[in-house]
Amino acid sequence: MGKLKTYTRRAFLVGSAAVAGGVAFGAYLVARTPENPNLADLAEGEATFNPWVRIDASGITLITPHADIGQGAASMQAALIAEEMDLNWGDFRTDFGRPAAAYWNTAMAGDAAPVLPWDEGFGARAMRATMESVIKVVGLQGTGGSTSVPDSFVKLREAGAMARETLKAAASARTGISVADLRTEGGAVHLPDGTEISYTELAAEAAGIEPVHGTPLREPSEWRLIGQQMPRLDILAKSTGTQTYGLDIDLPDMARASVRMNPRKGGALNGFDASTAEGMPGVEQIVEITGGVAVVASNTWYAIQALDAIDFDWGEAPYPAEQADHWAALESGISDETLDSEWINDGDVDAIPADAVEVSAEYRAPYVAHQPLEPLNAIVLVEDDTVQVWTGHQIPRILQQQVAAITGHSADDVILHNQYSGGSFGHRLEFEYVKQAAEIALQLRGRPVKLTYSREEDFAQDFPRQITFARSRGAVRDGRVTSFDIQIAAPSVLGSQMGRIGFGAMGPDTQLPAGVWQQPYAFQNNRVRTYAVPGLSPVSSWRSVGASVGGFLAEGFLDELIHEAGADPLEERIRLCTLDEVSRLTLEAVGEMANWGESLPQGTGRGVALVHSFGVPCAQIVEVTDVDGAIRLDRVWVAADVGRVVDPVNFENIVQGGVIWGLGHAINSEITYTDGIADQTNYHSAEGMRMYQAPEVTVRGLENGAIRGIGEPPVPPAAPALANAIFAATGQRLREMPFWNHIDFV
């Protein structure tokens, strides 16, 4: 296994220490329970039992620290607490809470460790333990990697059970009735005679009781909420246009600002002439910030108009100016100098028997923008003792550190009021927009500053999904796929993203092979190598990160091999799928859903793909029809195994949205560069999928594996399943996204 084997052996030793007692950080640090942040500002008569529950006479507040970026995280977290706490749905408030080490993400270790998701050997467990120790000690609070459900599923139910039993203890102390004779329902403790004491009535007394630990969680047969349909807590507000996002916040005496940065990302600002802009309506102040200029005005539109009037002298791009040179760098980047890791090397991919047929191909995936509907925005108020920030963000504690480094405050004195976000797709894992708002606010100390990006600036400054090139080779023999060899070249996602916040390399980039090396196929000969190509555009996490391209590279080429073998695309995948039973069951389920193998009309084709990402096997079958040389998308069937579906309606909606997202971007979205500047400036040049193009999407959630999340796994299989369906319908093999550069869609 090349470099990965060497790395894994080293990590195995560290991981073993962590398993044995936390030697890497000291047993105390690893075992220590972070403080309950609710204790810092607890009011008289208010009770808190753990970091997730607060109660006073006015009501119950459930802290839901995972950011809600449109995926329903607030509702999911509330449901898990309310399940064990015996709350009626919606009879509580939710709050994102203050950033705190207590909210460290217990599930991020799984995808961060370079081990296969189904590997439960000692070495794999040691690696996960090592990463979990790191995450806990640094108190990494984060939303991403489809970890919100697996992080929350046990600990939030435990939080609800702790609150419930402590409230029962308070009722017992008040009434003298044994806790064993009390029960809870509907946010109240019920006495044997039928009397009810609401939780809010018990808050003051419960505040003086030591929280009750170790209560067993209820069996699934007793669940009232988990697994049932429930209206999301934000559905009414979002359906009526009354939901408050960061963009909607208005504070007294608030200044409005917008920025203009070098459109060649990371290039210098050599100079600027703002003489025309200074006299324009509404302009209050023009300030220079790192790498660009901000205009402060009486409203955002005036600020944007003034920026358009400034004459800028921008420096050159620190990456190739023309798009063709990016592709050339990737093609030449498959070399020993850029080898990041060899993830799999089983058998001998170079020993191809004389009676075998060799197949080779090259695949490409472009840069792609995040483009959420809510443009980037943040409000920052710098005062002598504190800095307050209002924005939606996915890594709040690192945000505090980034802002503190600019303003000179301590990170603990940066108060983040996290907000609902109108989409992210990885965009709100970045910090540049918040740092810029902090720079402006530092120059307007004592006055809140609201920074809003124009849509064009959002596109120009986006750190896109990584551009990727793959060179693949394989072999078939006796009607079966026998060999699979893939080399993947791309900029390092983690290296680029972590480098912007000052984090160094931590081993091989697990996102370079994502969606490829986790594929559960037992090829006789198999090799996966990745190459981190430097010097290209800075990149960032994009919904499903490496798997968003890895699934296309792997499943597209596998389909070519299966076709050359003369085998059935679904049956051969099932035959090969012996490394992970849950994945095999997922493939079988999607085949049954679509009635795979039934006779299809002339010009109609189906394609199948399975991608294992973030621990979730997700299989899709796409059906298309050739309509006079253009492709119509008809139907999609999706099966995904997440171990437990918390809310079947939200699950279905997330999967359907992920499929549409994946299909739309595969069809027509890309970022290309001319003179170092992104050619695409707004939605007109990065459309996504139109409503009339959207197929019918049928979803099935499976519960055979471990508890996982679903926000990202529906995306990776969409592109290869579509490409494979187009081949089945037309005979045209698509090896490069976006597809509309090669074929028309209706």
Image (cartoon, helix red, strand yellow):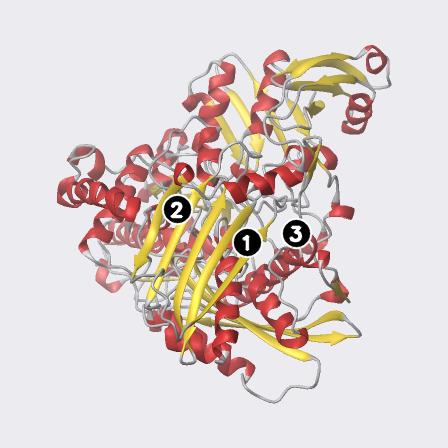
How far apart marks 2 and 3 lie (CA) works out to: 38 Å
The image position of residue 413, as x and y in percent, is: 44, 21
Q: Quadrant of residue 216?
A: bottom left
Furthest residue in direction left, as rendered: 20
Disc 1 residue type (three-letter):
Gln
- Above or below, 225 against 490 in this view is below
Count of marks overlaid on the render: 3
The front one of 480 and 245 is 480
> Would you call the spot at circle 3 few (<14 residues within 10 Å), some (14-19), or many (20 or more)?
few
Disc 3 residue type (three-letter):
Ala
Closer mark to the observer between disc 2 and disc 3: 2
> Would you call the spot at circle 1 few (<14 residues within 10 Å), some (14-19), or many (20 or more)?
some
How far apart marks 1 and 2 lie (CA) works out to: 24 Å
> Would you call the spot at circle 2 few (<14 residues within 10 Å), some (14-19), or many (20 or more)?
many
Residue on which disc 1 sits:
71
Closer mark to the observer between disc 1 and disc 3: 1
- Above or below, 142 against 725 in this view is above
Is label 2 in contact with label 3 (beta carbons under 8 Å)? no
Report helix, strand or loop for mark 2. Answer: loop
Disc 2 residue type (three-letter):
Thr
Report helix, strand or loop for mark 3. Answer: helix
Residue on which disc 3 sits:
237
